[in-house]
Image: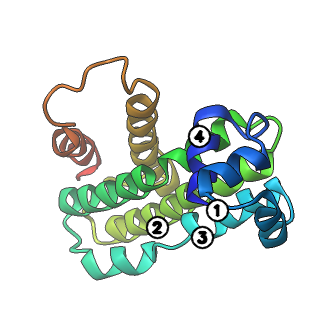
Amino acid sequence: MAATVELMSEKGYKAVTIKEIAAAASVSEMTVFRTFGSKKAILEAILQNYMFSTPIEQIIRQNITYELEADLLMISKLYHDVLKRDKKIYLISVMERKTMPEIHRGVHNNAVRFLSIVTEYLKTMQVKGKVVQGDPEIQAMTVMKFNYGKFIASTMLEGIVPVVGEDHIEESISILARGLKT
C-alpha cells in the first residue's frame, strides 16, 4: 500500500499500473491481484488504513481546557498533524476528484469530523460566555477554513515558495481567538 500511495501521489490513479505497483513493492503482479483484486481495491484499502486511524475526538476531549486560544491551537495542531500524515493520500484525492469523487469525499471525512468537534466546542463556549454569540457552525467553519487553507497553500506551494522560519500558527490562532472572545 505504501508503494501505491507513493506512485499515485506523484502520477495519479489512472497513470499508475498494477505492474508498477508490484515492482515498487517488490512483489509479483499476481500477488497484488490475489491480495487486492484491483487497483481501486488497493486505493480503498489505503483509505481504510490511513485515514481513520486517529481517535480525534478522544484526543481532543482529553486535552480541552476551555481556554479558547489554547484549545483552538491544540485542535489546529492536531488537524495539521492529521493532514501532514495523510498528505500524499490527499494529493491523490485532489488529482482524482472528478473521476473518483467518492474517494475525494472519503478523504475529507476527517475535515467533517473536526468541523463537528469545533462547532460543538464553540456552542459550549458560547454557553459559558467565553465567545461571542453567533452561529457556532459559521465560527467553526472560519477556524477550519483557515487551517485547511494553510495546509493547501503549504502543500501546493511546496518546492515553489521557500519556507521561511516558523509557520506562525500560534500567531494566526491568536488572531482568530481574539475575534471570537467576548
Tell me, yes or no, whether the two marked residues, 3 and 1, touch with CB atoms within 8 Å. yes
Identify residue for label 3.
Answer: 49
Where's residue 91, x and y in %?
A: 57, 39
Q: Secondary structure at mark 4?
A: helix
Residue shown at the point (29%, 48%) measured from the top left: 180
Quick one: 7 or 116, which is closer to the camera?
A: 7
Quick one: 154 or 68, which is closer to the camera?
A: 154
Question: Tag 4: residue type?
Answer: Ser
**Which quarter of the figure has residue 55?**
bottom left
Q: Which label number is shown at residue 113? A: none
Residue shown at the point (27%, 74%) measured from the top left: 64
Tell me, yes or no, whether the two marked residues, 4 and 2, touch with CB atoms within 8 Å. no
Question: Furthest-top residue in view?
Answer: 160
Q: Which is in the foreground here, disc 2 or disc 3?
A: 3
Tell me, yes or no, whether the two marked residues, 1 and 2, touch with CB atoms within 8 Å. no
Q: Secondary structure at mark 2?
A: helix
The number of numbered discs placed on residues in the rendered structure image is: 4
Q: Which is in the foreground here, disc 1 or disc 2?
A: 1
Is residue 42 shown to the viewer in this render?
A: yes
User: Which is nearer the N-term, disc 4 or disc 3?
Assistant: 4
User: Which is nearer the N-term, disc 2 or disc 3?
Assistant: 3
Identify residue for label 1.
Answer: 46
In the image, residue 98 above or below residue 58: above
Question: Tag 1: residue type?
Answer: Ile
Alpha-carbon span between mark 2 and mark 3 = 22 Å
Identify residue for label 4.
Answer: 9
Q: Which is in the foreground here, disc 4 or disc 2?
A: 4
Q: Which label number is shown at residue 117? A: 2
Mark 4, other Cα within 10 Å: few <14 / some 14–19 / many ≥20: many
Where's residue 124, x and y in %?
A: 38, 71
